Amino acid sequence: MVTFGNNLKQLRKRNKLSQKQLAELIGVGQTTIANYENDSRFPNQIILNKLVDALNISYDNLIGRQETKEYGELSTYVDKVLYHLLEGGEKEAIDFIVNMAKKGVDVIDIYYELLTKILYKVGDLWEMGLVSIPMEHHITGIIDQIMVLLSPYIKLNEANGKSAVFMAPSNEPHLVGLKIIKEAFRKYGWKTYFIGNSVPWTSLTSWIKEHDVDLLVISTTMNDNINQVEGLVDFIRNETDAKVMIGGQVYEMKEYLINQVKPDYFLNTKLELLSFLESQ
């Protein structure tokens, strides 16, 4: 597998840039670029954005993922698939997406670039009063069904001996994003346990100890859940040796989570997640 560092080195040379020149373009030292290229360090989101601009490439190109030529940019199909779903064409939508996987489109890309963006758009339509709550739930259910159908097409890496539990706060209604994160971990060789929400903390710690879990992944989309997440992280650290990762659409609370809750990892984007998984 081509590592992030090897890919960055190839892209830099393709642009006829020395390490020093690339470093100057993004405002870091030459040694930092060297560390990225030998995979001893990984850039944060700000640096990733600068690298994309400096090298004039997409995020997927930066981390070494190639688009399938037949389909191109997957996000261009969001409106087409959503139209089928809103108009009762579930079979057409499902068949179209499953055929993508059959023809070699990376399933994780389908999850992030198509399914996730469909859900975001449905949420926007609901906020504007253009989609009812039952329809939103109906489409979410179909997305769940599609994910089950796509799962066999995920090309799995060899097992890496690591394991992770995936959960959400007790009143978190949105779990599809967490399931997508879980599937990405599974692709990269992790043993994964999806336990959803409403799990008593004592039962959770017993499970972590019993299965020798390395990482607890918590996802939330609601600011109202932040206090519960903070309490859960403290409880897990007092009772187990597992590290904690937090994600979800809580961008406005990011600084608080990082500085006060202090998870071992805080990931909000596909690129951050895949860079993490590539480094393990």
Image (cartoon, helix red, strand yellow):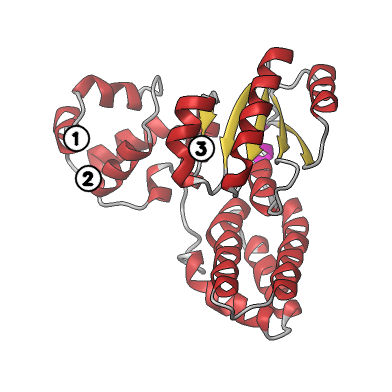
- Mark 2 Cα-neighbour bin, 10 Å: few <14, some 14–19, many ≥20: some
Q: Nearer the viewer, residue 141 or 40?
A: 141
Mark 1–mark 3 distance (CA, rounded to whole Å): 25 Å
Q: Which residues are magenta?
A: 185-189
Q: Which mark is residue 78?
A: none
- Mark 3 Cα-neighbour bin, 10 Å: few <14, some 14–19, many ≥20: many
**Residue 186 lies in magenta, yes or no?**
yes
Secondary element under disc 2, as helix, strand or loop, is helix
Q: Which residue is mark 2?
A: 54
Identity, as a three-letter code, of the amino acid under mark 1: Leu
- Which residue corresponds to the image point at 69% horizontal and 70% vertical from the top-left? 136
Residue 12 picture location, percent across and down: 25, 38
Earlier-in-chain disc, 3 versus 2:
2
Mark 3–mark 2 distance (CA, rounded to whole Å): 23 Å
Residue 105 picture location, percent across and down: 58, 59
- Find residue 39 and report its image quarter: top left
Earlier-in-chain disc, 1 versus 3:
1
- Find residue 209 and report its image quarter: top right
Q: Which residue is mark 1?
A: 22
Q: Which residue is mark 3?
A: 267
Earlier-in-chain disc, 2 versus 1:
1
Residue 230 visible at all: yes
Q: Nearer the viewer, residue 167 or 143?
A: 167
- Mark 1 Cα-neighbour bin, 10 Å: few <14, some 14–19, many ≥20: many
- Which residue corresponds to the image point at 69% horizontal and 38% vertical from the top-left? 186
